[in-house]
Image: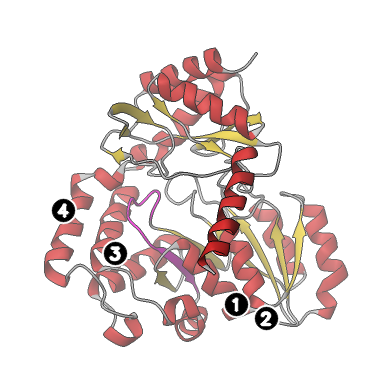
Amino acid sequence: MSDSLDAFATDKLAGLDAAALRRRLVPTARGPAASAERGGRSLVSFSCNDYLGLSHDPRVIAAAAEALARYGAGAGASQLVTGHSPPLAALEARLARHKGKDAALVFGSGYLANLGITPALVGPGDLILIDELGHSCLFAGARMSGAQIRTFPHNRIEQLRADLRDDRGAARRALILTERIFSMDGDRAPLPEILEIAEAYDAWTLVDDAHGLGVVAPGARAPLEMGTLSKTLGSYGGYLCASRPVIDLLTSRARSLVYTTGLPPASAAAALAALDIVETEPALAARPLALARRFTARLGLPPAQSPVVPVLVGAAEAALTLSKALEERGFLVVAIRPPTVAPGTARLRVAFSAAHAEAQVDALADALTESMPR
């Protein structure tokens, strides 16, 4: 039986290799100031979602170390079993205030949050409408719910309206899933229009703010605001901010919260310290977008809408070749390939951080210009 399993895996790997779609873990040591070390070489990383560089901020590290010493390395079990740790309770209160909501609930990761939220709110007989470029975990949670799923073209508001007009009447409840900043394209959802349509058809809206928290102006708020602690806040975990009744319901019904170990106290304390910095240092929070716009202006691209800028290449193999060429020049910019993005849209996903220097951004733009296939 193990022989047939290995044969199956080997055959699948051969297919991935032939399509330039195989993924490998490459030992890489991240450091401060957007640095990385790989294969004995020092690189400047433009592949990290640590948008403010807070994962290496001494204040964030100190908060995590203090919580680690006081509360231990792990949560021990589900927080419904061991109890709500003080750092976690404090973080939830601050997240709720930051988002202008009554309450918040922290999950083990953003992926786990989206696996738990949607199935707890909708199910068979209900309708989910999801942007086609929504993150994988939004689709995973939607499929787990058993609700009818309608995918609408990216940011096509009129199609969303038409889908609701056609299908809303037959559904008990309707839930719209989108992202504030789309993780692979870096563009923004038209939230005011989405929320207006949702109101007209009595649909609820969940916004995944994983890549927007603290680094872009939030604009309109959705009834369900989820995100991660692992990007701008430099820690680990996920959250939902919503009304008190919704949070209370999910505390009992979100399976990815009830049946898994709680977030380590040190991660919660680190995120709380990072949120303090986000709220008190607006110039730092504004820097990633400013650097992204410096980059797009230098390359003649449309102005960046977020710290994420895609450089479309097309073929997966060509994206890998370009990524390797940049690495040889001292830059870590990983190629993004299907199925993460659609076939024919492989790209370099350039992520900007407050930790980058303007000279590094300019050097990357120059290296990219010189390395692009002609």
Quarter that holds the N terminus: bottom right
* SS class, disc 4: helix
Kindly report the secondary structure that dominates the magenta region of the rendered protein: loop
Q: Quadrant of residue 336?
A: top right
Q: Nearer the viewer, mark 2 or mark 4?
A: 2
Q: Which residue is mark 4?
A: 62
Q: Which residue is mark 1?
A: 119
Please name the residue shown 19% across and 57% down the image.
63
* SS class, disc 3: helix
Tell me, yes or no, whether the two marked residues, 1 and 3, touch with CB atoms within 8 Å. no
> Dot 2: within a 10 Å radius of its alpha carbon, few (fewer than 14), some, or many (20 or more) residues?
many
> Dot 1: within a 10 Å radius of its alpha carbon, few (fewer than 14), some, or many (20 or more) residues?
many
Q: Amino acid at mark 2?
A: Gly
Q: Which residue is mark 3?
A: 268
Q: Amino acid at mark 4?
A: Ala
Q: Which residues are magenta?
A: 230-242
> Dot 4: within a 10 Å radius of its alpha carbon, few (fewer than 14), some, or many (20 or more) residues?
some
Q: Quadrant of residue 361?
A: top left
The percent position of residue 25, horizontal first and vertical second, equals: 42, 45
Please name the residue shown 53% across and 62% down the image.
3
Cα–Cα span, label 4 and label 1: 37 Å
Q: Which residue is mark 2?
A: 123
Tell me, yes or no, whether the two marked residues, 2 and 1, touch with CB atoms within 8 Å. yes
* SS class, disc 2: loop
